[in-house]
Image (cartoon, rainbow, N blue to C red):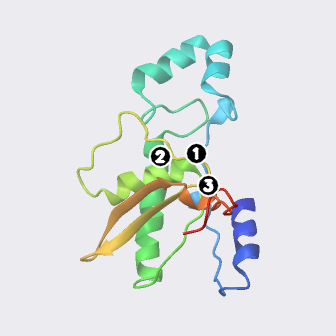
Amino acid sequence: MRTWQEMARTAADVVDVETVVDERLRDREMGVYELYTPAALRARSPEEADRRERVGEWHYRPPGGEAMTDVAVRVGQFLTDLDRAAQGRSVLIVAHDAIVIAFRHVLGGIGAVAPGRLPPVPNASVSTWENRGGRLALTSWGDTRHLTRPTTPTKETPHR
């Protein structure tokens, strides 16, 4: 939510944006291991870390938490509703990496292979899908080019 608030504040002079918050786009819930890094999980509960490795990240459901398959169900339901509510409109979704990964899987369509190893989603990155014949197609993944500032030319490096 804080990321969106900063983006909205920055963009306020450029565009009027309708904002909708949907709880289905919350981050993956990790239950009793919320905020644990993989190293902290291994130190605290080696048997749970072994189970996580054995079943794989996509199917791993921590005690009291969600597997990525659960997140994908939430995202699929959201996308169905979004298709009806925003048909023909461009939509910006601001969310955590688990949601972006679930989007990629769900938008892959029926028969999409669950990722064996989850693709990284860099912080503050942008992933883009475009409508191609009534189906959303991935056109960029984890793009961070917007985070680099252009360098200012100096006497030694003339501007071209």
1 or 3: mark nearer the eye: 3
Against 155, residue 45 (above or below) is above
- In this view, 14 is above or below 81: below
Instruction: Name the residue nearer the viewer: 12 or 114.
Output: 12
Label pair 1/2, CB-CB below 8 angstroms: no
Cα–Cα gap, marks 3 and 2: 24 Å
Q: CA distance from mark 1 to mark 2?
A: 9 Å
Residue assigned mark 2: 70
**Residue located 56% across and 47% down the image:** 122
Residue type, mark 3 in image: Ala
The residue that label 3 is drawn on is: 124
Q: Amino acid at mark 1?
A: Arg
Where is residue 141 drawn, in percent x and y?
43, 54
Q: Which residue is mark 1?
A: 28
Q: Residues within 10 Å of mark 3 (few under 14, many from 20)?
A: some
Say which amino acid is labelled 2. Answer: Asp
Q: Quadrant of residue 11?
A: bottom right
Locate residue 144 relative to residue 12 in the image: left or right.
Answer: left
The foreground one among 79 and 95 is 95
Q: Please rate how many residues cluster around mark 2, counting C-alpha atoms within 10 Å: few if below 14, some from 14 to 19, many from 20.
A: some
- The location of residue 151, given as percent across then percent down, is 65, 59
Pointer 1 or 2: first along the chain: 1
